[in-house]
Image (spheres, rainbow, N blue to C red):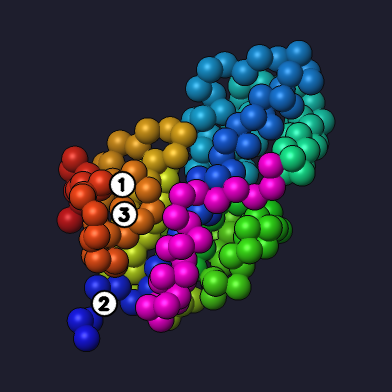
Amino acid sequence: MTALPFAAVIFDLDGTLVDSERLALEAGRRAFRRFGVTVTPGFLEGLIGRDRETVAQVFAAQYGDLDQSALNAAIRAESAALRRTEGAPLKPFARELVAEIAALGLPMAVATSSGRAAAEAKLARAGLRAAFRVLVSADCVHRPKPAPEPYLLAAARLGHPPARCLAFEDSDTGAEAAHAAGMRVVQVPDLVPGSGRHAHHMAVDLRAGAQAAGLLPSRDAPSAQPAGTSPE
């Protein structure tokens, strides 16, 4: 039997496993409209992959005249309303890939910039929580993405060196964190195009990325390619 190229797999959550970024952006736009504000184009998209503290700081810097507590409450309310109508949609091949990795016997973790409660809820709604041995949330680290700490902690809790871990990310912020941790990085851009600067493989979906990295055998025509400046 051919040895597997990785000992563990670590996933980002929002925009990588769960199709939540689209809902989050819409919730943000609706919340701002409650205050009579039309958000500057690209403003919310620029926050994708950032931790809660950074998002709060950017909100305050850009829209400091708004009541931040009331704004956050409005965002939570709009998010809850969208979840009730749309549930917890997954990214293409997310469920299938997680099942295939489990069948290979590889342990999996999630490393996310979401808070613990939100991450647990998203995974539970998607029916994926039991697949992940480790969940590293923003509450677990001192330095969130793009710092490598979330990925380093996930690898440590899985019991494998970072160099033996494969990471899946959608954002440049997350890819930078995984690469800085010393992992092989697959980037599957979501709503914001990725630069590929910190990725070893850019892919159109999770399955294509897994095939490009050698985790799964390639069965179809290539739909992934090395990033333009693949990191060493």
* Tags 1 and 3 touching, CB below 8 Å: yes
Q: Does the magenta stretch include residue 151?
A: no
Residue 97 at what x, y percent from top left? Answer: 42, 63
* 79 horizontally vs 225: left or right: right
Disc 2: CA contacts within 10 A as few (<14), some (14-19) or many (>=20)? few
Up the image or down, 205 lies above or below 111; here it is above
Q: What's the residue at 28%, 41% (across, down)?
A: 196
Q: How far apart are marks 1 and 3 (CA)?
A: 5 Å
Counting from the top left corner in percent of width and height, residue 36 is at 76, 13
Q: Sequence-wise, which precedes: disc 1 or disc 2?
A: 2
Is 99 magenta? The answer is: yes
Q: Is residue 132 found left or right of 5 in the rendered image?
A: right
Q: Which residue is drawn at 43% across and 33% down?
A: 192
Secondary structure type for disc 1: strand
Q: In which quarter of the image is residue 44?
A: top right
**In what element is the residue under mark 3?**
helix
Residue occupied by mark 1: 203
Nearer the observer, 64 or 15: 15
Q: Which amino acid type is shown beneath numbered disc 2?
A: Leu
Marks 1/2: CA–CA distance: 20 Å
Q: Please give left or right for residue 204 compared with residue 150 in the image.
A: left
Q: Is residue 91 visible?
A: yes
- Residue annotated with mark 2: 4
- Please state the extent of the stretch shown in magenta in the rendering: 86-108
Q: Which amino acid does label 3 sit on?
A: Gly
Location of mark 3 (residue) = 209
